[in-house]
Image (spheres, rainbow, N blue to C red):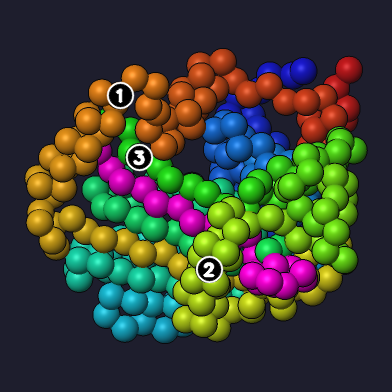
Amino acid sequence: MPVLSIAELTELAARALKRAGASKAMAETTAQALVVAEAEGLSGHGLSRVALYAQHLREGRADGKAKPKVVRKNGATCLIDAGGGLAFPAAALAVNEAIKRARKYGVAFVGVTNSHHFGAAAYHLAAIADAGMTGIALTNSPAAINAWGGSKAFFGTNPVAAIFPRRNAQPIVVDLSLTEVTRGKIMLYAKENKPIPLGWAVDRDGNPTTSAQAALTGSLTAIGGVKGTALALMVEALCVALTGAALSYENDSYFEPGNKPRIGHALIVINPEALAGADVYFSRIEDMVGQMLGDAGVRLPGARRHLAVAKVQAEGISLADALHQELLKLAGRSRKK
């Protein structure tokens, strides 16, 4: 298994995306996000997505030349149109707009419409924590979860992420899909032609399945049953009804030929200074963390990611040979012996 640095992999992934039709800015912004996900151990949202994104760019399901822009704004809120491009440039613009508005108004809500796959949701929140603010990121996605009592995929996996900065320590990071497993993880099983555990998904006819391929076109099991589907509805409304994006069931699966996604995202940013104040916020966060870690065995959300990144920065990222060769081919480079 080859071992490459973060810089080497970012350049390789960006080159592959540019060859597929992405602009330089879109390719580089996307590559950075995918490599960070890989470094954090989130391979389902990492470099395995390069081939899929490249395919969508070539097929016109994603516009490689799109430039996101603010199309509506009103005080603490604004709406960004991703223009049908890959999500990461639009998400970066959304983060900048949200931070700017939260500094002025104390809180901000920024919606994104006409977008694509959002990647690891918490990735977009790092800059918000660096600014000393708390953030929440939400997105819908192609239908994956049946509405409660139904058998057909209706809501997306609709991830929810949040970040809480700390003083002199890594932030607390919460990032979860509303399914038992992410679709990206099932995609990896499908690529390796491995069966999935029973209970992860049902096929398109509503039958329990251990086939990863059938799961990708079927419905995934929501966390917590009816509670998980209710949360999926909440995310759907915030990301779609407020932004004008396409509902999850209106977006075709990423993994089959289909329409151009019109995914919706939402970012909520809160400035602690607008409430009890930053000093109180950081003090209360540390009181909570100290009490939690006083119980042996407790691990803070996001801690594993931070450790993984530190290890990768020192040692590089090990890639499966097949994935490395796929990236080299997409980047137009000769296969290394």
In magenta stretch: residue 162? yes
Q: At which x and y percent is residue 260? A: 75, 73
Q: What kind of element bears circle 2?
A: helix
> Which residue does the image show at 55% across and 83% down from the upper left?
244
Q: Amino acid at mark 1?
A: Asp
Q: Amino acid at mark 3?
A: Ile
**Position of residue 254 in the picture relative to residue 271 (left or right):** right
Residue tagged 3: 172
Q: Quadrant of the C terminus?
A: top right
Q: What kind of element bears circle 1?
A: loop
Comparing 161 with 298, the one in front is 298
Residue tagged 2: 230
- Marks 1/2: CA distance? 32 Å
Q: Is residue 297 above or below residue 324?
A: above
Which of the 4 image quadrants contains residue 39?
A: top right
Q: Which mark is residue 295?
A: 1
